[in-house]
Image (tube, rainbow, N blue to C red):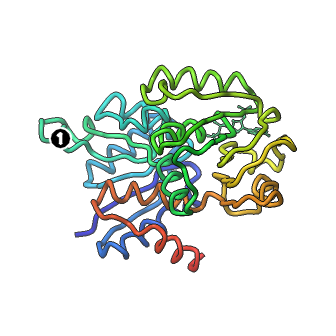
Amino acid sequence: MTQHFIVIGNPIAHSKSPEIHEQFAVQAGIDISYQRQYCPDDTASFIAVVEAFFNGGGVGANVTVPFKQVAYDCCAARGGLSAHAKTAGAVNTLSINQAMLQQGASITEALYGDNTDGQGLINHINSLGWPLTGARVALIGAGGAARGVILPLIESGIGTLTIANRTVSKASNLVDELSTASETIGKHSIKTCATSELTGQFDIIINATSIGLSGDTLPLSEMLNCHYAYDMMYGRPLPFLQHFAARDAQTSEGYGMLIGQAALSFERWTGYQIDVATATETLRQNK
Ligand code: ATR
């Protein structure tokens, strides 16, 4: 029997999720339909789309811009949130909380939210062979993308974490908020600073800002170095990666993170474990 999935966003035509999940389904040997679902940019429309999909037998939905926070609120009031969704303050993966259904909740009351973005990054970094255990990590950015990777980074066993941002107060507020919300984060001492003041030697530096979209470049210090540089953006030459490649660092764009987060959603919905490296290679060849 065909299992139905959607990705909900606005705009949505550019989404690569259908081809990624179809590739996973080939690998898993199951029959799925995965569609792009446009939704008007308001909460009532989002809820209507989600309810219609799951009441119609849908198995799982991905959520993208601009609905990740709305999805969070929706799940917080219904079937609950995973620890990663809670700390990210955003949901990218919707499913039905089966335990609640068995206790008599309706499908829409049992809507459950997860966030696989951060763990997708960790899985990609692991697949690159970049050591995370004990690593000195710098994360640049303090918006939604940065927020979602903080708990998964700490859970992966990194050593020190420094968060740098153009607006330092946003970074320190984020650390204060997450340290209170999560015991795991609270136990970890996290430094904050302005991006231009980030200096010294790190093992891994991750760019989680949206600067790649603007054409601007980050004000990186000449006294900043790393072994590995990761940009969560993908699909075009990225000045951040060029900067560190010229300083002999290994670099990676975020395409593998995209596949990694999708694989985690697919695994949670279907129970099939995906060989991400093989799927990524096939998808790159088909691009
Ligand atoms: P996202 O969900 O992609 O993280 P966001 O929440 O709007 O988007 O956050 C964007 C991040 O990129 C922020 O850290 C922002 O820095 P500020 O907090 O100082 O605004 C950073 N950013 C965006 N454009 C930037 C630029 N031109 N220079 C430096 N940082 C930039």
| Image quadrant containing the N terminus | bottom left
In-image side of 65 versus 52 (left or right) = right
Residue drawn at point x = 68 percent, y = 63 percent: 235
In front here: 252 or 283? 252
Under mark 1, the amino acid is Ala
Residue 138, image x, y percentages:
66, 40
In-image side of 174 versus 91 (left or right) = right
Residue 179, image x, y percentages:
50, 23
Residue drawn at point x = 48 percent, y = 58 percent: 260
Which quadrant would residue 268 be assigned to in this image? bottom left
Residue drawn at point x = 63 percent, y = 52 percent: 232
- Dot 1 alpha-carbon crowd within 10 angstroms: few under 14, some 14 to 19, many 20 or more: few
| Residue 199 vertical position relative to residue 253 in the rendered view, above or below | above
| Residue 200 vertical position relative to residue 169 in the rendered view, above or below | below
In-image side of 206 versus 281 (left or right) = right
Residue drawn at point x = 61 percent, y = 57 percent: 254
Read off the residue under disc 1: 99
The quarter of the rendering in which ligand 1 is drawn is top right
Residue 107, image x, y percentages:
23, 42
Which quadrant would residue 21 be assigned to in this image? bottom left
Which quadrant would residue 111 be assigned to in this image? top left
In front here: 279 or 98? 279
User: How many circles with numbers are drawn on the protein?
Assistant: 1
| Residue 128 vertical position relative to residue 134 in the rendered view, above or below | below
| Image quadrant containing the C terminus | bottom right
Residue projecting furthest to the left = 103
Residue projecting furthest to the bottom = 285
Asked if the residue at label 1 sits under 8 Å from ligand 1, the reply is no
Residue 182, image x, y percentages:
44, 26
Q: Is mark 1 on a helix, strand or loop?
A: helix
